[in-house]
Amino acid sequence: MITLLEPFLDMLVAERSVSKNTKAAYEADIIQAAQFFTRRKKDIASADESDISAFLKSISALAPKSRARKLSSLKQYYRFLVSENHRKDNPTTEQEGPKLARKLPDVLSVDDMQKLFAAVSGNTPESIRMNALLELAYGSGLRVSELMSLPLSSYSNKRRAMLVRGKGDKERLVPLSQPAHAAVAAYLEVRQRFLPKKAKASPYLFPSHGKDGYLSRIRFYQMLKDAAAKAGLPFKKIHPHSLRHAFATHVLSGGADLRSLQQMLGHADIGTTQIYTHVVRDHLQKTVETHHPLAKKRKS
């Protein structure tokens, strides 16, 4: 038995709205640590700093990201034990996780996006739907999970914004560009074509025949790959999240402030949004080096 494990996991769901996968990861991390302490004839609830250090040393062969996550799980677990008066101290307080290098996302250029939109242009219901999906993903920076499950009620032709439910079940108001607004309006004219068989209505903006009742992320990924092939763009560069990256980078390059971008993307921590400042800086530096007449060393 692990002290207060179930109450801790329940707290994560109730107070932090973590997903099932995240909850399972926390549980696995804590069970792994508990088993290690048991071999040292210690209970996880009474482990001290030396025990924590020994555990972290035992997992040193894992990738930095995995080690950081396991330490984070323990930090939150012990914090919970302290809050519930099962411990007076948190033995993980002085423990530092591995330094994680942030990988800068691949960013589609404005020219790439123009090619992608040209590839999906057309008058068929499928083309009109795909154009609307692209406009929302790129024009509003929605996560693919948010985009796929958008309720029909989130859109209104009387306003230029959509109410989106994101991570942690938090709602935010996302502005719509004029092209996105027009694309969704055009799509609604053919939306009936995509309703499940024998269904007269659907609560989702992008209904589908699938079990969830709305277009799946896998299907959207396949559609995006098809569009990339038609546009002559590299497959590895095109995926649903790359559209969100493109939105963030292009908006920031256009002069948007970081705080506004954070709100539009639905980031809880502005540190997550700051990665795009590095992308924009690198892009601008390359632009100067390529096009400024005095940026390169003159030949002697």
Image (cartoon, rainbow, N blue to C red):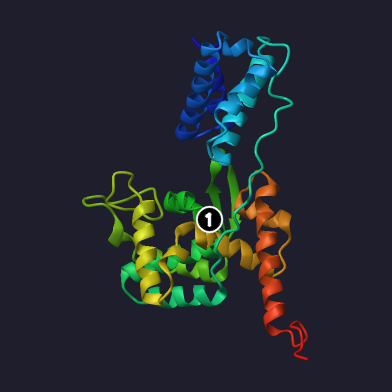
What residue lies at 21% left-to-right and 50% top-to-bottom?
A: 198
In the displayed orientation, state which residue is furthest to the front: 300
The reply to whether residue 274 is in sight is: yes
Q: Nearer the viewer, residue 206 or 60?
A: 60
* Residue where numbered disc 1 is placed: 142
Query: Where is residue 94 shown, x and y percent of the image?
Result: 74, 26
Q: Is residue 31 left or right of residue 125?
A: right
Q: Nearer the viewer, residue 134 or 178?
A: 134
Q: Is residue 300 left or right of residue 30?
A: right
Which quarter of the rendering shows the C terminus? Answer: bottom right
What residue lies at 31% left-to-right and 73% top-to-bottom?
A: 124
What residue lies at 64% left-to-right and 15% top-to-bottom?
A: 81
Query: Where is residue 242 shown, x and y percent of the image?
Result: 51, 61
Query: Where is residue 59 shown, x and y percent of the image?
Result: 55, 30
Q: Nearer the viewer, residue 299 or 90?
A: 299
Q: Secondary structure at mark 1?
A: loop
Q: Is residue 148 left or right of residue 30?
A: left
What residue lies at 65% left-to-right and 9% top-to-bottom?
A: 86
Up-down relation of residue 288 to residue 281 (above or below): below
In the displayed orientation, state which residue is furthest to the left: 198
Up-down relation of residue 120 to residue 238 (above or below): below
The reply to whether residue 215 is in sight is: no
Up-down relation of residue 295 to residue 248 (above or below): below
Up-down relation of residue 87 to residue 180 (above or below): above
Disc 1 marks which amino acid? Leu
Q: Nearer the viewer, residue 162 or 261?
A: 261
Q: Within 10 angstroms of label 1, few (less than 14), some, or many (20 or more) residues?
A: many
Query: Where is residue 31 shown, x and y percent of the image?
Result: 49, 20
The number of discs equals 1
